[in-house]
Image (cartoon, grey):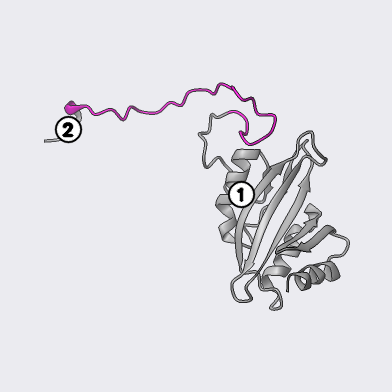
Amino acid sequence: MAQALIDAVKDRFSAAVLDSHSQAGDDTIVLQGEALLDVVGFLRNDPATSMEMLVDVTAVDWLGRREPRFEVVYHLYSVSLKHRLRIKVPLSGDDPSVSSLCSIYKGANWPERETYDMFGIRFEGHGDLKRILLYEEFEGHPLRKDYPKRGHQPLMDVPSLAYDPEDQDE
């Protein structure tokens, strides 16, 4: 079925497919970012593909190893047809951004925010793209290959959580 998924995408969006492979259960399509919403919408809504679930969104930083620098990686799954597909979207390191999938999968909200937080990749059209794991004053994106190993961060202004017996209500 996996090769049939890849073929369906290639048939319908041939200009957008940069690469694909299907081997040992690793079924992947590499797409141009401009086509992401159309392809994922098709995969979700077409009864022949029926990719009802976005399992994960993450990224890879290829700094110094290949260009373009980043890949955003999506894992889709069809609960009803029991097949899965990985989609990769290459992004330049200058201003990495891609369309948000929140309009197709509401569950894209948090993994897109996590990917933004850790890699600095912006998801255009995301309604609440802000840090989810790190505090707002945190500088940089720690999963980028050029993040300093011994970087110092601004301190958080957090109220003390120490026990104070004077604060107890009677």
Circle 2 sits in a helix, a strand or a loop, which is it? Answer: loop
Please identify the residue farthest to the right as the structure is shown: 15
Query: Which residue is more in the foreground, 103 or 53?
Result: 53
Residue occupying the point 52% across, 36% down: 134
Residue 11: name its quadrant: bottom right
Q: How far apart are the alpha carbons under marks 2 and 1?
A: 41 Å
Residue occupying the point 82% across, 70% down: 7
Kind of residue at badge 2: Gln
Label 2: how many residues lie within 10 Å, few (<14), some (14-19) or many (20+)? few
* Image coordinates for residue 14, horizontal then vertical, percent: 87, 64
In the visual, does 14 lie left or right of 46? Answer: right
In primary-sequence order, the first of circles 2 and 1 is 1
- Looking at the rendering, the stretch of residues picked out in magenta corresponds to 139-166
Task: Locate the N terminus and report the quarter of the image it occupies.
Answer: bottom right
Residue occupying the point 55% across, 50% down: 110
Q: Nearer the viewer, mark 2 or mark 1?
A: 1
What is the total number of numbered labels drawn onto the structure image? 2
Residue that badge 1 annotates: 112
* Image coordinates for residue 22, horizontal then vertical, percent: 77, 64
Kind of residue at badge 1: Glu
Q: Residue 133: say if magenta.
A: no
Q: Residue 159: say if magenta.
A: yes
* Image coordinates for residue 23, horizontal then vertical, percent: 76, 63
Residue occupying the point 52% across, 22% down: 154
Please identify the residue farthest to the left as the structure is shown: 170
* Magenta segment, prevailing SS (helix, strand or loop): loop
Residue 91: name its quadrant: top right
Circle 1 sits in a helix, a strand or a loop, which is it? Answer: helix
Residue that badge 2 annotates: 168
